[in-house]
Image (cartoon, grey):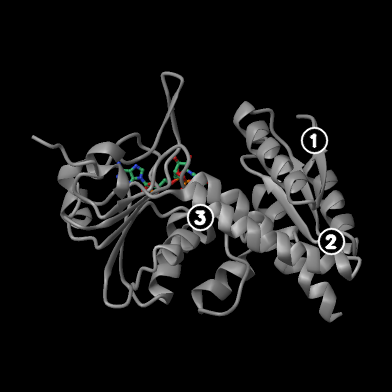
Amino acid sequence: MQTKDYTENIVDVKKIVEEKKKELRKRIEKLKKKNIVPKLAVILANDLDSSRIYVNNKRKLCKELNVEEVEYILDNDIKTEKILEIIENLNNDPTIDGILVQLPIYKHLDKERILNSISYEKDVDGFHPLNLGKLLSNQDSMIACTPKGIEYIIDSLNLDLEGKLAVVVGRSVIVGRPISQILLNKNATIITCHSKTVDLKKYTKMADILVVAAGSPHLITKGMVKEGAVVIDVGINRKNKKILGDVDTNNVAKKAKYVTPVPGGVGLTTVTALIDNLVTIAERRLKK
Ligand code: NDP
């Protein structure tokens, strides 16, 4: 008896990212011809290994795509006022296109004041309230990198969301809320679930497209998914030295039309989306 191979239902996100990088290289080349090199400023104000890994990944991609990057690695005695001063200088520096503060930051710092002090025009992470507000009102805005990366996946799978039911698990400002809004702007009907949702399965089972950003390893099992659904797994959970998503990928793949893997899924698109945002900001220099 032949067994069906379900791995074809697992989305090849690497391929999607390679296509995106090709497009980015062309845009960066075009800017270089006008003597413009996109430049990113990264502020690291915590001592977590995971944040250092994320910053390393960003640095690597900047190098690969030939864009400039400058880092401010700050000790734990740094004051909010000092970071505000650094950001003010970066806001006023015409050679800097994008500024990001790697989250989380040291607990004693005023996160809100720091994030809000980044000029919304250089807000490469899309966390500034003005950019979030623009997304809410369906205006052109700087979209947070993870939701933007999810959009690459949706677009490359040619998914038509009009009239579809999209369920998002998670309501954080960096993932859950913006992706719900993006899906709404694409004319899907939205349900956003969170930790206080009663009977999560009732909602996930109805979803034509299910986006999971809860930070709970293998929260979503095969029995919680509708036949033929598209499942996008945002979760990154470290367990017994392994990285697990929020979705039980191999089993869900037996039922879903598509499921994104972890690792090698949304995480890859996130950092690519960051460079996409950076290049978009640098392109505005052409119009000045
Ligand atoms: P947060 O902790 O900020 O938010 C998690 C959300 O999930 C909250 O809204 C929470 O509800 C909800 N939630 C948690 N547990 C459950 C549950 N059992 N049932 C229903 N809802 C639940 O996390 P983030 O949004 O920052 O990140 C989510 C996941 O995505 C993490 O694993 C993170 O590591 C990963 N991530 C991955 C990225 C990538 O590039 N691939 C980028 C960013 C994050 P409530 O609001 O009620 O607390």
Closest to the camera, between mark 2 and mark 3, is: 3
Q: Counting residues from the N terminus, which is met first, the one under dot 2 or under dot 3?
A: 3
In the image, residue 206 above or below residue 198: below
What amino acid is labelled 2 in the image? Asn
Q: Residues within 10 Å of mark 3 (few under 14, many from 20)?
A: some
In the image, residue 30 above or below residue 247: below
Tell which quarter ligand 1 is in. top left
Q: Give the x, y percent position of residue 131.
A: 61, 69
* SS at badge 2: helix
How far apart are the alpha carbons under marks 2 and 3?
33 Å
Closest to the camera, between mark 3 and mark 1, is: 3
Q: Counting residues from the N terminus, which is met first, the one under dot 1 or under dot 2?
A: 1
Q: Which residue is under mark 2?
A: 91
Q: Give the x, y percent position of residue 99.
A: 76, 55
Furthest-front residue in view?
1
* SS at badge 3: helix
Residue 119 visible in the displayed image: no
Q: Which residue is under mark 3?
A: 16
Q: Which residue is under mark 1?
A: 73
Q: Give the x, y percent position of residue 207.
A: 23, 60
What amino acid is labelled 3 in the image? Ile
In the image, residue 160 above or below residue 105: below
The residue located at (35%, 37%) in the rendering is: 216
> Which is nearer the eye, 264 or 239?
264
Disc number at residue 59?
none
